[in-house]
Image (cartoon, rainbow, N blue to C red):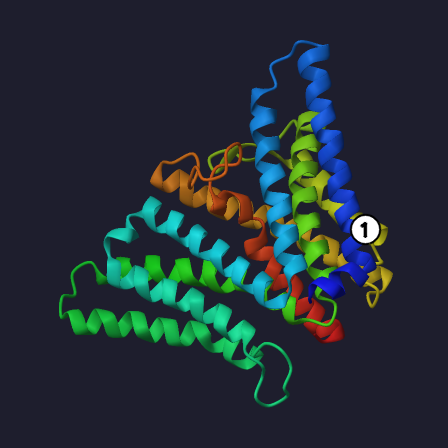
């Protein structure tokens, strides 16, 4: 990955044109509804303004090269974990919070480092063992405190936050080391958002039966099923991004996004309902926090990463 490689990549150019076109069409649609039909589009406008910041930021980070992309995804993980720590109260425990933030930085460092055995970008073996070192560090910190009260809760919150946000999301950064980095990253990022939009649209059009009333009241079984079906077909339409995948592998990759995206979304919803918050943050207007925006990637990234690695190597 590099600026010259991005310009030479057909995948990067097609997705750049596609996302730009969608932003233009989306903005025009909002304008027509607002001024042509005099409808209130404030919510849609807030969401759109979020996208016109998110999309160029991601595009620039991927265009700038492998190292910048990995550092960008690490910053996203730091922001998401910070929101999680504040929402759960973990931020009051500075030692545990620092250990997890150090672990997230360590994930980025491992992704940037070349494998000493093969010379390939990204030290995969160490990446897989980082959770062991973070777990040991959390336990050691608790021992050195010599104060057992409340330590199980602190360790559980910290370790879950690292595994779920730091390590699982860290697979996105590690995809920047693959031979087909632009194809894998752009497919995954675009497909996850398409899955969210498809679930919302199908739910509005066909939704009748709730999916999980106490976790996410507005989600429906029809919306979820429609999103899974659309996600399963989508890779077949963008096979230029997954050139090594057979048709069956494309469908399976789509199912990973369709099912994994819902699991990621619902998992964060469980946490939000338990602690009594609507959004994990307010950084992105119209979208909530960073963690609200990346929740669908938390499952799909590791599942897609290991499927691609098993099927075709990285």
Using the rendered view, name the quadrant where residue 44 is placed: top right
Nearer to me, 194 or 122: 122
Quarter placement of the C terminus: bottom right
Nearer to me, 174 or 69: 69
Q: Is residue 142 left or right of residue 46?
A: left
Q: Is residue 149 left or right of residue 167?
A: left
Q: Does the image show residue 251?
A: no
Q: Residue at x 40, y 58 (%)?
A: 161
Q: Is residue 157 left or right of residue 64?
A: left
Q: Number of marks in the image?
A: 1
State the image coordinates of residue 306 (x, y, percent, origin top left). Answer: 64, 69
Q: Does the image show residue 162?
A: yes
Q: Determine whether 117 is above or below 26 in the image.
A: below
Name the residue beneath numbered marker 1.
14
Q: Is residue 71 left or right of residue 152?
A: right
State the image coordinates of residue 49 (x, y, percent, origin top left). Answer: 59, 32
Using the rendered view, name the quadrant where residue 228 is placed: top right
State the image coordinates of residue 233 (x, y, percent, origin top left). Answer: 81, 48
Quarter placement of the N terminus: bottom right
Q: Residue at x 71, y 68 (%)?
A: 308
Residue occupying the far top of the picture: 38
State the image coordinates of residue 122 (x, y, percent, origin top left). Answer: 59, 76
SS at mark 1? helix
Q: Residue at x 50, y 54 (%)?
A: 76
Residue occupying the far left of the picture: 146
Q: Residue at x 75, y 72 (%)?
A: 311
Residue occupying the far bottom of the picture: 117
Residue occupying the far front of the picture: 4
Q: Determine whether 275 is above or below 60 in the image.
A: above
Q: Determine whether 202 is above or below 168 in the image.
A: above
């Amino acid at each position: 990955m590099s600026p010259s490689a991005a310009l030479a990549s057909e995948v990067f150019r097609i997705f750049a044109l596609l996302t730009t076109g969608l932003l233009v069409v989306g903005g025009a649609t909002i304008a027509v509804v607002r001024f042509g039909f005099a409808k209130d589009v404030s919510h849609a406008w807030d969401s759109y303004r979020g996208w016109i910041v998110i999309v160029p930021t991601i595009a620039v980070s991927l265009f700038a090269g492998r190292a910048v992309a990995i550092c960008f995804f690490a910053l996203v993980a730091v922001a998401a974990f910070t929101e999680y720590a504040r929402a759960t109260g973990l931020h009051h425990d500075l030692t545990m919070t620092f250990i997890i933030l150090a672990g997230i930085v360590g994930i980025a460092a491992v992704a940037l480092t070349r494998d000493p055995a093969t010379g390939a970008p990204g030290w995969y073996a160490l990446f897989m063992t980082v959770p062991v070192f973070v777990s040991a560090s959390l336990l050691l910190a608790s021992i050195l405190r010599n104060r057992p009260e409340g330590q199980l809760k602190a360790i559980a919150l910290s370790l879950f936050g690292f595994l779920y946000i730091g390590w699982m999301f860290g697979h996105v950064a590690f995809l920047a080391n693959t031979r087909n980095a632009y194809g894998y990253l752009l497919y995954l990022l675009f497909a996850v958002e398409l899955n969210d939009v498809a679930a919302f649209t199908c739910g509005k059009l066909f939704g009748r039966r709730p999916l999980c009333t106490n976790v996410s009241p507005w989600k429906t079984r029809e919306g979820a099923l429609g999103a899974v079906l659309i996600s399963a077909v989508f890779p077949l339409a963008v096979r230029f991004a997954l050139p090594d995948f057979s048709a069956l592998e494309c469908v399976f990759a789509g199912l990973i996004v369709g099912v994994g995206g819902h699991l990621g979304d619902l998992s964060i919803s469980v946490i939000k309902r338990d602690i009594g918050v609507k959004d994990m943050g307010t950084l992105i207007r119209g979208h909530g926090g960073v963690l609200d925006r990346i929740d669908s990637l938390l499952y799909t990234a590791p599942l897609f990463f290991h499927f691609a690695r098993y099927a075709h190597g990285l």
